[in-house]
Image: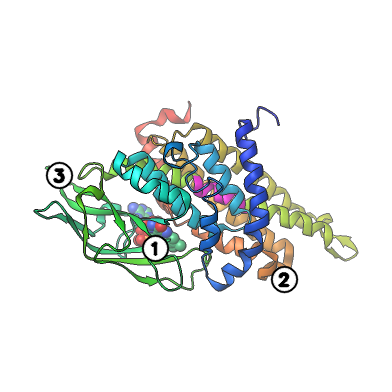
Amino acid sequence: MSNRDIANPTEEHAMLREMVRDWTKEYVEPQAHQHDKAEKFNLPLMRSMGELGLLGISAPEEYGGAGMDAVACTIVHEELSASDPGFTLAYLAHSMLFVNNLAYNGNEDQKQRILPKVCSGEWIGAMAMSEPDAGTDVLGLTTSAVQQDDGTWILNGRKMWITNGCIDEEGTPADVVWVYARTGEDERGRVQLSTFLVEAGMPGYSVGQKIYDKTGMRASNTAELVFDDCVVPAENLVGEVGGSMRHMMGNLELERLTLAAMSLGIARRSLDEMNRYATDRTAFGSKIRDFGQIQRHIGESFAKYRAMRAYVYDTANNLTIGTAGQRLDSDGVKLFATTAAKEIADAAIQVLGGYGYVGEYHVERLWRDSKLLEIGGGTLESHQKNITRDLFKDGDAINR
Ligand SMILES: Cc1cc2nc3c(=O)[nH]c(=O)nc-3n(C[C@H](O)[C@H](O)[C@H](O)COP(=O)(O)OP(=O)(O)OC[C@H]3O[C@@H](n4cnc5c(N)ncnc54)[C@H](O)[C@@H]3O)c2cc1C
């Protein structure tokens, strides 16, 4: 291994990649097509990742995590996604949106009580920000939390599109959800958001519906959650009242990086499929890879894939988990990599012709899954907006 390998900067990273790649080949790949078809989340497979130390990849070891960095998180998402982006999205919602958030923003009691359970896979976690009427416009969310005289909080509202919101076909809710709610306004009239840990069994917390018939990511469950006078104990408030924006922004950066890593896995697999097929398939007495138009699909996809890989791992190497301030690149890399993955999967379908259009050949699933990455965790338009705003504030970032 070259010490200039941006994607495997240390021996530990290279070993992690090898372990996850082997495990993915053996356990993730064989079930991917069927779970997509059945729109079913593979809960036992997810739980089994606890034994590998992957569910708490970035959580400190003292709570059952692996204590690894952003590059490690990127490696795991890339490798899993090369086989099954739908399953990887469920993994991301658990390990990045719940576990990492708690590890970096929870208090000591919350971490001691909950982290070992989510790191082992005993509990499955989710993160609930989006609502039926508010997605990009996060300050427009209306789920409310009001504190009672006895200190408990009463939550009312609905959350929409929540990955792992339910964990099976019976509508069993996630064991624990990281919920953002409105707790009032500050002295300047700005909306205050606070964060609550809502656990299965708390009165008033239920699944509204599992959302079926998604374009892609069908191996992950997406659900609507209902909070109807939901009673949450005082100790389940995370951080300060009104303090969500700070930790929300920090975690979004890691979310965007790992969504870009998922795009990278999709791109790599699509390129691999089209490259092999172009050798195997003959038409007009030649391998189709001898045709200039097929060469354009392969050549351009390869160059895009390599550019994605460099940007994804450059961002990962520079991202310190738990700190905010790397938004330009976490937005930039997701903006670039998600669309590049969709284009490469599209080129793969084109190279495979009719075969590319059916599930058995994988690439149509990767193409369907890739589309979500242009929407979830921030739409393309939100990244364009953020980048332009940040470059207005700090134009020198271009020349650094
Ligand atoms: C499969 C799936 C899984 C998801 N998982 C989760 C999850 O686990 N947790 C969670 O909280 N959410 C989740 N989401 C929600 C996702 O993050 C939102 O869908 C996304 O943020 C967009 O919000 P929206 O759908 O409300 O669209 P909107 O915000 O209503 O946007 C609609 C369109 O308007 C554009 N737009 C909005 N505002 C602006 C603006 N200021 N300038 C320019 N254009 C703008 C958008 O870019 C988009 O094109 C998931 C969504 C899906 C589909």
Number of the label disc, if any, that sits on residue 236: none
Q: Position of residue 76 (x, y in %)?
A: 57, 46
Q: Secondary structure at mark 3?
A: loop
Rendered position, 389 above or below 356: above
Q: Quick check: which quadrant has ligand 1?
A: bottom left
Q: Which quarter of the figure has residue 162?
A: bottom left
The residue mark sitting in front, 3 or 1, is: 1
Query: Is most of the magenta stretch helix, strand or loop?
Result: helix
Q: Which residue is mark 3?
A: 186
- How far apart marks 2 and 3 lie (CA) works out to 58 Å
Q: Is residue 314 visible?
A: yes
Rendered position, 162 above or below 94: below
| Extreme residue in the left direction | 149
Please state if 164 lies on the left or on the right of 10 as rendered: left
Q: Which residue is mark 2?
A: 354
Q: Secondary structure at mark 2?
A: helix
Query: Magenta residues?
Result: 258-266
Q: Residues within 10 Å of mark 1 (few under 14, many from 20)?
A: many
The quarter of the image holding the N terminus is: top right
- How far apart marks 3 and 1 lie (CA) works out to 30 Å
Q: Within 8 Å: ligand 1 and the Cβ of disc 1?
A: yes
The stretch drawn in magenta includes residue 337: no
Q: Residue at x 54, y 43 (%)?
A: 74
Pointer 2 and pointer 3: residues touching (CB < 8 Å)?
Answer: no
Rendered position, 362 above or below 269: below
Amino acid type at image mark 1: Gly
The residue mark sitting in front, 2 or 3, is: 3
Number of the label disc, if any, that sits on residue 165: 1
Name which of mark 1 and mark 2 comes first in the sequence.
Answer: 1
